[in-house]
Image (tube, rainbow, N blue to C red):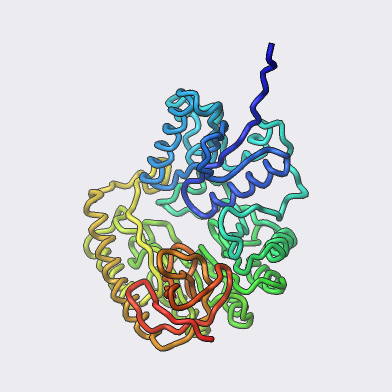
Amino acid sequence: MKARTLKKDKVNIITMGCSKNLVDSEVLLTQLRGNGINASHESNSDDNNIIIINTCGFIDNAKQESIDTILQYVDAKEQGLVDKVYVTGCLSQRYKDDLEKEIPQVDAFFGTRDLPAILKKFKADYKHELVGERLLTHSAHYAYMKISEGCDRPCSFCAIPLMRGGHISRPIEELVKEAKHKAANGTKELILIAQDSTYYGLDIYKKRNLAELLRNLSDVEGIDWIRLHYAYPTGFPMDVIEVMKERPNICKYLDIPLQHGSTDVLKAMRRGTTREKQEELIHSIREMIPEIAIRTTMIAGHPGEGEKEFQEMVDFVERMKFERLGVFTYSHEENTHAFGMEDLLSQEEKQDRANHLMEVQEQISYDLNQDKIGKTFKVLIDKKEGGHFVGRTEFDSVEVDNEVLIDASKFYCRVGDFVQAKVFEATEFDLYATVEE
């Protein structure tokens, strides 16, 4: 009689949502492989028998996408195509009890801080020696670095503290160790992310310590660019701008989510600031670094936003002329402070406002980009797509900002390398450039 051979488990991790989730998936992937488990990220192979879905629970669309993905793999399990489906991440943290009732075919649900519990399912241990090391799921020349977890802010619209818990900073030594490991493996750009990066250090150093972290990371050999995301504006530590000004490898770039331009709506949002204070902050930052690119986000349709308040936000955007802007429509999230406020606008009305705001921004972006024609920039090449090499200047973050397009039939660039590129044409969100020898 022929002996039955046991098929070895192959794990596929699927990531939904933001770059913070991607970092969590990369840490999980590193730990699984460090324990000798055959694991991959978003593999197209059809022989993965265990699926881990890292979900997003941020807004309605993201929640629906996460649920659809869970159902897709539960269906595959029922057809015998996979053996186990595990669910982790923000949606699972927030709605675990409901999900267990609604989708009992899932083998286990985990929260956002349950990594050891996931590893236990694989009879694997959390390996502390792998802290600071992380397998990247994309090109190695850039890497997201999560400097803290969770958030202590009381913003009315935001469910992140419900899913991610309170703010916890990672020690500077641990982050420097991670940066050195990344640099040794070919990373040239670190993209610093957190729920609230300007709060960094308050819990472990008893002071805002982002500037000190930036100095230490800036000293790591091999890191050419350090980019700062998600800097909360209230109580913004201006010493961060001083470090940015003095250190050439810290990008003259700041992602600072302001969320609105009306003082009344900012109050309803519990943001702890006013339109005037936000304007003052932006002016101060630009005074110190005139060439800085400021990225921000706005929310259209928050409860309390009438026509007057919306127009105040439009005027604010027109006056501030942000180099980069993203717009979300307000999502009415249960258990948040704003859930108790009446949500008077339809989704269509919110979308119309968001579209109008983006039209205003398109013109601003077009005008700013026209000024770049004839200028030469240091550009990091991210990929080759169609007939172009696609890169970014220090004023642009990956996937969300402007791109520099270089004709691949005329110039050869290596992905992950820097080139000097001269802009000869510009649209609202793209720069066309030639490579300078």
On the question of residue 283 being in view, the answer is yes
Residue 167 versus residue 6 in the image, above or below? below
Q: Residue furthest top?
A: 1
Relative image position of residue 124 (x, y in whole percent): 72, 35
On the question of residue 394 being in view, the answer is no
Of residue 168 and residue 369, the one placed in the foreground of this image is 369
Number of callouts: 0
Relative image position of residue 244 (x, y in whole percent): 59, 78
Q: Quadrant of residue 57?
A: top left
Of residue 176 and residue 205, the one placed in the foreground of this image is 176
Q: Quadrant of residue 103?
A: top left
Of residue 167 and residue 387, the one placed in the foreground of this image is 387
> Is residue 219 toward the left or the right of residue 309 in the image?
right
Q: Residue furthest front?
A: 1
Residue 248 versus residue 30 in the image, above or below? below
Relative image position of residue 297 (x, y in whole percent): 40, 63
Residue displayed at 31% across by 71% down: 361
Q: Quadrant of residue 184?
A: bottom right
Which quadrant is home to the C terminus? bottom right
Residue 321 versus residue 376 in the image, above or below? above
> Is residue 332 toward the left or the right of residue 158 in the image?
left
Residue displayed at 62% across by 69% down: 188
Relative image position of residue 224 (x, y in whole percent): 63, 74
Which quadrant is home to the N terminus? top right
Residue 84 versus residue 220 in the image, above or below? above
Q: Residue furthest bottom?
A: 374
> Is residue 322 toward the left or the right of residue 221 in the image?
left
